[in-house]
Amino acid sequence: MGTQPTSLYERLGGIYSIATVVDDFIDRIMVDDRLNANPRVDDAHHRVLPPGFKYLVTEMVGEASGGPQRYTGRTMEDSHRDLRITPNEWEAFMDDLNQTLDKFGVAERERSELVAIVRSTRDAIVVPVL
Ligand code: HEM
């Protein structure tokens, strides 16, 4: 019996589920004091409107998980360079992500694949420590 490989996109439940998770996650990071302690992040979080931000992240996760969406935003380097994000801020961001994945009870396999996708962007986002 052949088993069809199923994309992460399908296993997550498609774009409605992905958008719901992104919605919760972005609401969480926008008010995270550990991230807003960085004045550049705080400033950007007040300038960038959540719906557009959620839209772009949803597009990105859709594409990265094997869905039909195509990411239309800026590169991770271009959109984060000026924010000078530190390793500790990165950890806070991953903690917020885990809280969101807990809330929706995302299963272990899907969770680790999603976390791996996010983690693959780290070097483009976090400033190198000297
Ligand atoms: C500590 C980690 C992170 C922080 C504090 C952070 C914060 C921000 C902020 C403040 C912006 C708005 C920048 C601006 O327009 O001036 C932004 C843009 C964006 N971020 Fe992040 N980010 C982080 C990590 C990530 C990760 C891991 C992803 C995706 C895997 C991501 C996806 C995006 C996208 C798609 C945009 C919009 C790009 C565009 O405007 O075209 N971010 N981020």
Image (cartoon, helix red, strand yellow):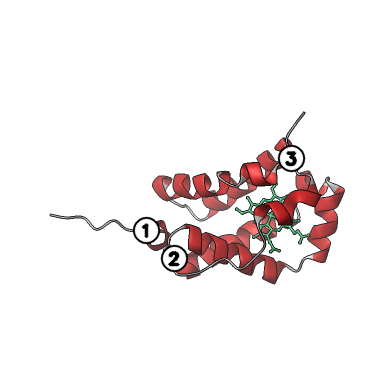
Residues at marks 2 and 1 touching, judged by CB atoms closer than 8 Å: yes
Residues at marks 3 and 2 touching, judged by CB atoms closer than 8 Å: no
Amino acid at dot 1: Ser
List the residue tagged with mark 2: 67
Ligand 1 sits in which quadrant?
A: bottom right
Give the position of the N terminus as an image quadrant: bottom left
Answer few, some or many: residues within 10 Å of disc 1's Cα (few below 14, many 20 plus, some between 14 and 19). Answer: few
Residue at 62% over, 66% down: 56
Amino acid at dot 3: Val
Residue 7 got which mark?
Answer: 1
Tell me which numbered mark, 3 or 2, is placed earlier along the sequence. 2
Query: Can you tell which quarter of the image residue 66 is in?
Result: bottom left
Query: In the structure shown, which secondary structural element does the residue marked by tag 3 occupy?
Result: loop
Distance, label 3 to label 1, CA atoms, is 32 Å
Give how far across and how far down residue 24 sits, in percent: 62, 60
Residue 127 got which mark?
Answer: 3
